[in-house]
């Protein structure tokens, strides 16, 4: 049962290298603008969600 519960916990960046990779990834993302199409805005926003899910321990901007 403990392993099952542990598998549901969000992954965290456990090493300094992983944390730096997550921060660099976050800093490389582009924010959507009003000039972008709806599809582009959705894709750019989704990239932030994916990065946040993959790197929950990375400091927010």
Image (spheres, helix red, strand yellow):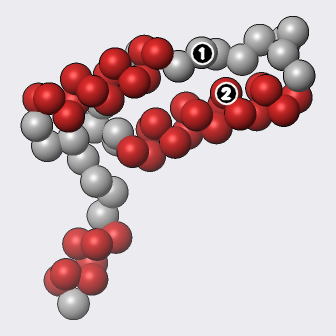
Q: Indicate the secondary structure of the residue bearing disc 2.
A: helix
What residue do we see at 34% from left, 70% from top? 8
Which residue sits furthest left?
A: 15
Give the Cα distance between marks 2 and 1. 7 Å
In the rendered image, residue 34, in percent from the top left (x then y), is placed at 84, 12
Up/down of 52 relative to 6, above or below: above
Front residue (pair 18, 1): 18
Q: State how many labels appear.
A: 2
| Residue 51 located left or right of residue 2 | right
Quadrant assignment for the C terminus: top left
What residue do we see at 33% from left, 57% from top? 10
Q: Quadrant of residue 32?
A: top right
- Mark 2 Cα-neighbour bin, 10 Å: few <14, some 14–19, many ≥20: some
Q: Badges 2 and 1: C-beta atoms under 8 Å apart?
A: yes
Q: Indicate the secondary structure of the residue bearing disc 1.
A: loop
Quadrant assignment for the N terminus: bottom left
| Residue 39 located left or right of residue 52 | right
Q: In this figure, which residue is indicated by the disc labeled 1?
A: 30
Q: In this figure, which residue is indicated by the disc labeled 2?
A: 44
In the rendered image, residue 42, in percent from the top left (x then y), is placed at 76, 34
């Amino acid at each position: 049962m403990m392993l099952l519960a542990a598998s549901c916990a969000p992954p965290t960046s456990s090493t300094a290298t992983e944390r730096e990779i997550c921060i660099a990834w976050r800093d490389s993302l582009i924010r959507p603008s009003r000039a972008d199409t709806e599809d582009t805005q959705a894709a750019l926003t989704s990239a932030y969600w994916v990065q946040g899910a993959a790197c929950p321990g990375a400091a927010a901007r």
